[in-house]
Amino acid sequence: MYAVYAHSIEKYEPLKGLGTGAQPEPAELAARPGWTTVAVRAAALNHHDLWSLQGVGLPGERLPMILGCDGAGVDEDGNEVVIHAVVGEHGRGVPEGERATILTERYPGTFAERVAVPRWNLLPKPAALSFEEAACLPTAWLTAYRMLFTRSGLRPGDTVLVQGAGGGVATALIVLARAAGFRVWATSRSEQKRERVVALGAHQAFESGTRLPERVDAVMETVGAATWAHSVASVREEGTIVISGATSGPNPPAALTRVFFHQLKVVGSTMGSRDELAALLRFCETSGVRPVIDSILSLRTEAETGFAKMAAGDLFGKIVFTL
Ligand SMILES: NC(=O)c1ccc[n+]([C@@H]2O[C@H](COP(=O)([O-])OP(=O)(O)OC[C@H]3O[C@@H](n4cnc5c(N)ncnc54)[C@H](OP(=O)(O)O)[C@@H]3O)[C@@H](O)[C@H]2O)c1
């Protein structure tokens, strides 16, 4: 079957390790008890796929590895489904003692004609969402949902700051936070992206690093080293910084004095559960919220274009591949 995969690990030039072409069908996995195959209709790109090409979470001995955490498609019984990307949550579908991983770390991903997953990982695709929209939800949007609604402690009416506003997780944070009744502020390095996030629903957008009019109740961090000091400076006393990523690097200036003097809470967050994904799907259905899509590209002919756009930071929302 046709697939887009990592064939080598390239720390500094990740796109060199990207392969396109024939890969084996996931027949062996599909034959496991409780597993099934999904014919992929749409699959979204995440920064995680770039990390994989750089060897983060993907050791060389597991290559070649089909990339792609997010997908929506049609199962063996003809049902339209969304795939929960975490394999092995609560031990479901994996050998005893195996820890949960996201697709592409241990099991081949969604950038292929077919992907095998435990049946438990499938959720019905709401009819109101297209395959392209549904494919955006399981990683970036689920991460944003958990950061905001499970980990932050925010209540409607509170003010939230979203750093690095143009990214997949960040645009999800802005749309979800606005729909939930928060006051939404965002930062971006790009003037054009600042205009776009205001059109998307942010109440105000600021250049990265700018002093804010007042301190916020919580900051949503995915940028890491480049924005961390600003996040610590921008949150109110006893406020919260929720962090789920470090795109610009994992070793920020610690700014520890302010963390303890102002009794800040620094809260880590990773992906989300199947239950949270089900709630996110309902949230989209009932609120009318839809994922922000930068571009829809062909997996067969435009995979390299999509990866290059992400590597250059030249995107606003999600890049989706269709089959
Ligand atoms: N823990 C988890 O489960 C989980 C799940 C999903 C994602 N993540 C992580 O979260 C991060 C974001 O993921 P994503 O898929 O949303 O990535 P993405 O779409 O590539 O977005 C990255 C955004 O970060 C901002 N940025 C990058 N470098 C920056 C810098 N030097 N200074 C300021 N801003 C910078 C940019 O915003 P502007 O151009 O607007 O400034 C860019 O749009 C990644 O590191 C990813 O691995 C973690």
Image (cartoon, rainbow, N blue to C red):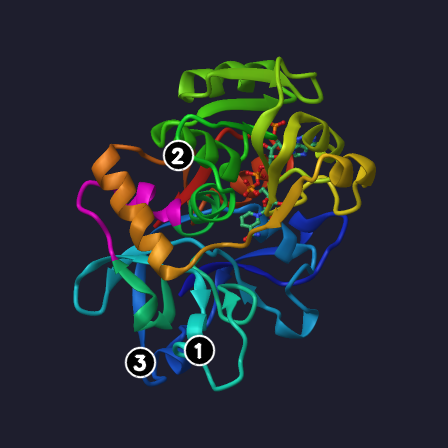
* Amino acid carrying mark 2 in the image: Leu
Graded by Cα atoms within 10 Å as few (under 14), some (14 to 19) or many (20 or more), the crowding at tag 1 reads few
Q: Which residue is mark 1?
A: 91
* Helix, strand or loop under label 1: helix
Q: Position of residue 282 (x, y in %)?
A: 25, 46
Mark 3 or 2: the one toward you: 2
Residue drawn at (79%, 41%) of the image: 252
Residue 113 visible in rendering: no
Q: Name the quarter where the N terminus is drawn.
A: bottom left
Residue drawn at (37%, 71%) of the image: 116
* Helix, strand or loop under label 2: helix
Q: Is residue 183 left or right of residue 55?
A: left
| Mark 1 within 8 Å of ligand 1, using the beta carbon | no
Q: Nearer the viewer, residue 41 or 196?
A: 196
Q: CA distance from mark 3 to mark 2?
A: 33 Å
Residue drawn at (32%, 34%) of the image: 290
Q: Position of residue 301 (x, y in %)?
A: 45, 45
Label whose residue precedes the other's in the sequence (3 or 2): 3
* Amino acid carrying mark 3 in the image: Gly
Q: Position of residue 11 (x, y in %)?
A: 75, 53
Q: Which residue is mark 2?
A: 176
Q: Is residue 273 magenta?
A: no
Graded by Cα atoms within 10 Å as few (under 14), some (14 to 19) or many (20 or more), the crowding at tag 3 reads some
Q: Is residue 166 left or right of residue 122?
A: right
Q: Position of residue 264 (x, y in %)?
A: 67, 39
Q: Which residue is mark 3?
A: 34
